[in-house]
Amino acid sequence: MQEGLFAQVNLPKVYRRRRLTNNFMLGLTGIALFLAIVPLIWIIVYVLIKGGHYINLDFFIHLPRPMGTQGGGVLHAIEGSFIMVIIASIFAIPPALLAAFYLVTYPNTLLSDTVRFSTDLLAGVPSIVIGLFGYAVIVVPQKHYSALAGGVVLALIMLPVVIRSAEEMLKLVPSELREGALALGAPEWKTALKVMLPAAAEGVLTGIMLSVARAAGETAPLLFTALGNDNFEIGRFIHYGIASHQSVINIIGQILSQPADALPLTLWKYAQQPYPERVKQAWAVALVLMLFVLTLNITARVWLAKRKSRIRR
Amino acid sequence: MQNTLPIKMEIQELSVFYKSFRALNKVTMPVYEHKVTAIIGPSGCGKSTLLRSLNRMTDLVPGALIEGKVLLDGEDIYDPKKDVVDVRRRVGMVFQHPNPFPMSIYDNVAFGPRLYGLKKRAFLDELVEKSLRSAALWDEVKDKLHQSGMALSGGQQQRLCIARAIAIEPEVILMDEPASALDPVATLRIEELIFQLKERFSIVIVTHNMQQAARVSDYTTFLLMNEERAGELIEFNVTTTLFTRPKDKRTEDYITGRFG
């Protein structure tokens, strides 16, 4: 028999109940984990099976053929996605990084609180509303849909993601690093550019990659802005531009002012076509898009994990 | 005796406020040229605030306010006409945690000189070597100048930061507990280094470690917070005198370990 403090309880019984509770809860969390992972794996496997056999070189280098015919590819969507993501990056990343520096340097001013609040609000605006905004502000005045308008609305989607992730990463940089540079007499901007940014570079890049993945997967905002364009082909504009001796800016301007297609937009359109060939292509587009976004996400997160384990002292 | 020594910096009736809170109350003390001045006192007594006010790092704290004067060679560094960059070029700083920049050892040391327009490669090569030698780090890093400064050991990183600070040839070096994050061997090397550096610079060092203050400094200031939690100067004297024959009862209590 037990003596002293534990004389009045049956310790083996307490231990057994604890063990049972522990195993039960562990089982529950295991089931929850399974439920969380299954949909993801299901989606990946399903899309792989449905779209995998349609992927070949032609799919990447040809424009779409007319509906009801065989073959053709989605070059227009790949190039359109590429162009619009680049436009979005150019518009979103520089101001987002500047804003992040401001938020880290002056964390508690009225302006920084306002910026943080409105950034969070912007991140919460439904993407189709952002698309409508682009339609009203760019498409209507210009009187035509364009890759430029598509890029700008994607920039609005990237902006809050980059600002908040860059802020988080810059916050991880020890304040003594900034003070060290300022103590040498360095101006604030040089400290930001030469010391803070390199110290947080991997983390900031990770945030940018995540935002690109987000922008590349958006459909709704492009419906009102880029519209879609089966004949979008950069090569053609470049050939024509060179042949007619146009300036580089002119050629770029022509490309940007075309309506453009994008992978998610193409997927959305193809999936509702009555032609089996188009539906098969839609699955293949889904696969390409998914692999692109997945690769960006995984690379970014692996980088981030490495970064976080290293930056703190 | 000490009145005949050349004075590098003179702190006169210096008070520092953070918003309405008075962190430092009317501190007056000299910093003698080519001497090591230690600032000791319990946590929160304003040691770091005093140190940081000597090269205007207090400017970085929103709401910080200065009263009184800090003279550098007779000129008030808080004079509105005084350029803060010039103050920081002449009064360098070494921090508690080694803070090498995310760049090569060479670029770390050349960072300061480049800020002031010194860009000629051959000149910089020489300056980097000289600074690293002065910081007793050259022999350990001469073969890997272009590797990251962050890959060095803690003690080496701190000596790199000292090399970086002295590369712009400041007149005064402020050290904020420079060895508190280091192991005993690395600490000893930093202390030896301080002993060599005082031939060329005037040094002010904040330390938690009284033995360290006794070992490295020529003069010691003892700070203590008053009832309103503002740091006040209790005693300033030659280090050996302060540690062996303190004038103030509170100094005696502190150095004999009765509090703090």
Image (cartoon, coloured by chain):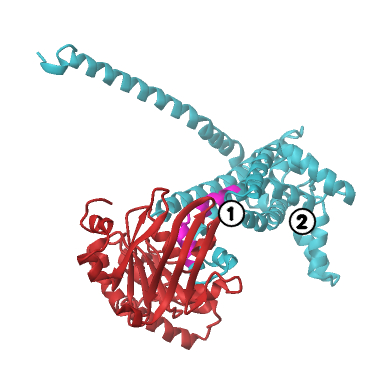
- Secondary element at tag 2: loop
Disc 2 to disc 1: CB gap under 8 Å: no
Q: Work out whether residue A287 or residue B142 is closer to the camera in this orientation and state it.
A: B142
**Which residue position is annotated with label 1?**
A106
Residue in the image at 55% along x and 71% along y: B84
Q: Quadrant of residue A174?
A: bottom left
Residue A278 on image: x %, y %? 72, 38
Can residue B146 be seen here? The reply is: no
Q: Judge from the rendering whether residue B229 lies leftward or rightward of residue A70; answer left or right.
A: left
Q: Colour of chain B?
A: red
Residue B134 on image: x %, y %? 34, 80
**Which residue position is annotated with label 2?**
A233
**Secondary structure that dominates the magenta span:** helix
* Magenta span contains residue A227: no
* Cα distance in 3D space between marks 2 and 1: 45 Å
Question: What chain is tagged by disc 1?
Answer: A
Which residue reaches farthest bottom?
Answer: B122
Q: Nearer the viewer, mark 2 or mark 1?
A: 1
Quarter of the figure with the C terminus of chain A: bottom left
Residue B97 on image: x %, y %? 37, 61
Give the total number of marks visible in the rendering.
2
Task: Please give the letter of the chain rendered in cyan.
Answer: A
Categorize mark 1 by other alpha carbons within 10 Å: few (<14), some (14-19), many (20+): some
What number is the disc on residue A26?
none
Q: Judge from the rendering whether residue A183 lies leftward or rightward of residue B208; answer left or right.
A: right
Q: Judge from the rendering whether residue A139 lies leftward or rightward of residue A221; answer left or right.
A: right
Q: Judge from the rendering whether residue A268 lies leftward or rightward of residue A250; answer left or right.
A: left
Amino acid identity at mark 1:
Tyr
Amino acid identity at mark 2:
Glu
Quarter of the figure with the N terminus of chain A: top left
**In this picture, which residue range is highlighted in magenta?**
A164-181
